Image: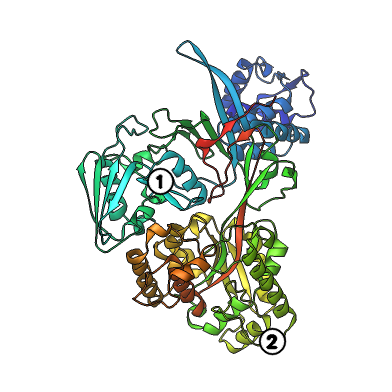
Amino acid sequence: MRLAEEYVRLRLCWQQRGQDEAFHVTMAELAAALCCTSRNARLITSRLMEAGWIVFVSGRGRGHTSVLTFCRPLAQVVLDEAKERVQHGDVPGAFDWLHQPGVPVEVQSVFMDWLGSYFGYQGHQRNQDSSVLLKETLRLPIYRPIVCLDPADAVFAFDTQLIYQVYSRLVEYDVPTDSLQPGIAHHWEGNADATRWSFYLHKHVRFHNDRLLTADDVVASLQRLMNGTYAHRWLMQTVNEIHAVHPHKVIIELNQPNRLLPLLLSHSGASIVPAGIDAAETIILPIGTGSYRLNERTAGRCVLERFDSYYGQGALLDEIEILIVPEQEMSVSSGYRPGVLTVLTGEFDTAVFDHLPRQETPTGVSMLMLNRRYGILAKDEALRQAFCYGVDRLAMMMELGDTYGMPATGLTVHDGSGTADHLPPMQAEQWHKHALRAASLQSDHTNSGKPLFADDPFPIETDIQYAIQQVQQSAYDGSELHLYTFQRHERAAYWLRDAYAAIGIRLSVQIVPWSELNSESVLAKADLLLFEAVVSGGLYRQLEYIQSSNSLIRRLLPDDSLIRLQTWTDRLLSEHDAHNGMCDRYYNQQQQLADIHATVLDDTCLFSVSDWLDAVHDELRQAYSCVFLTERTAAMVFHPSLCDVQINERGWVDFGRLWFREEE
């Protein structure tokens, strides 16, 4: 790598000289070109000669010039170096290398074609025990860094995607069927009041270091989560004690009833890690029991290798190689190679993929969280109302397009891709009603009434005239309020800035790395946070935003709100009948649930997930603590030769199910 840099530095200094053209040069000129001493310049020229890249005849005696000849084409050296950087996992470095002054433009074009062909499916033969086998590799581009692979602390979608491949949990939650499936535990049962749970473990489960898993590993993993200051410590908040009865049975004692404990233990944060291993030792290459093990990891590359001793159905592809690609280079990195698979989240034009099969899924809710702990928004309800009613969600959806789906109504998503055409008839009718109502409110500026949350199952909180009135009645003096977000939401942030300017509110947009959005320094300065609440995983994701101490919702709410939310959550955990479904889908089953559960929240009926969500939404809406904007979607495009592609709630796919069909 260093040799190529030195050669290019020399070549660009004498780019007027042709290849294989000998010319005179002094050692002082060489040293100046290489930005080093004459002694180091001699060492560098010696290495370049040994590599066969130059011919160098040193001048004899003081004052005599040397003769230098360039033997390798500049374009080839630049291209080979860029390819080598990609293969070592440094895709950003490859682009930086290509974009340096003096690099021929045609090299960049050739590199882009090569990079497009680099991703996708690769199959090559290998010898093993005198047999010829086919090793199948799938290379995938991703466009954001891997932040954290410790299950207890991982919060970002792709981090948890990898965790679900590398680790296992006692129980696995299947989103499409809304059911719990065996994981490391093949059976589990709770006592009558759901304060004591027993989990029975599969035998012969092995970690990636070939060590057998026992109940002690389960106990150590959950105790670590319970006793640490981790992002997902909330999963253990009802747990009092965990102990191993024998190597294949674990008992969990609770301090209050929790009928949803098995569901919570299917969360990525409850993944099982080996006992007795310092977490710091596994930061780079974590050890789990999943169908893939992490075989290699650098800042820009990680390689998942099929774990042949996996206790369940093994992965079908031998290797998944993941490379981090700069966001600005997304559209050129995916290519058209058989087996290519790319996740689209709205950051670049997707027309280039129109010829490929596509799957799309709702992932969460784009929302503004208003800071009710510090600053003017903590004290001024009229100004908070202006934020809630002063944004046209349908206009936002239409103008930002692509991954911005239908207007959001809370911490829930519909089973569609953002248009009424994808909704069941009753929902489609409500959506159209919703759109007409919003259009009417937008055009009728004499309407001073505001939408009623309780009367409309799909409320759009848009009333521009009312919002302007609230700004005028508030204590707001026209100074800038600070909106913080990260790069993925940059377009939406500036759209909101302009939308709120129209009703008299000035916003400054602050873009920070997504790993910093939750930091104390940002929260102390932010009046508003813009982010996506990823709730498509179902109930445990919704609970996470209400219960986790790291939640961007929870961290900006006042203490009295948190107390009320905790009361509703405790009731849900103690009363919800999980046999009626883990999530009792809020929209899809709302009508049926109304026939089963009373609409008035009292102590005489079971408390359903719908009841809990109603209580949560009422708490957030009635005090105008947040602005639900639009639902968000993620899409996946893939080559038809890649089979069993099923996009999941994280916008990715279970790598272990993928397989490749050769084209005939």
Image x and y of residue 539, in percent: 45, 59
Q: In which quarter of the image is residue 63?
A: top right
Q: In which quarter of the image is residue 192?
A: bottom left
- Which mark's residue is nearer the viewer, 2 or 1? 1
**Label 2: element kind:** loop
Give the Cα distance between marks 2 and 1: 52 Å
Q: Which mark is residue 131?
A: none
Give the labeled residue for mark 1.
Answer: 181
Image x and y of residue 81, in percent: 64, 29
Residue farthest to the top, as pictured:
130
Give the labeled residue for mark 2.
Answer: 447
Tell me: residue 467, above or below residue 394: below
Q: Quadrant of residue 616?
A: bottom left
Which amino acid type is shown beneath numbered disc 1?
Gln
Q: Nearer the viewer, residue 315 or 644?
A: 644
Which amino acid type is shown beneath numbered disc 2?
Asn
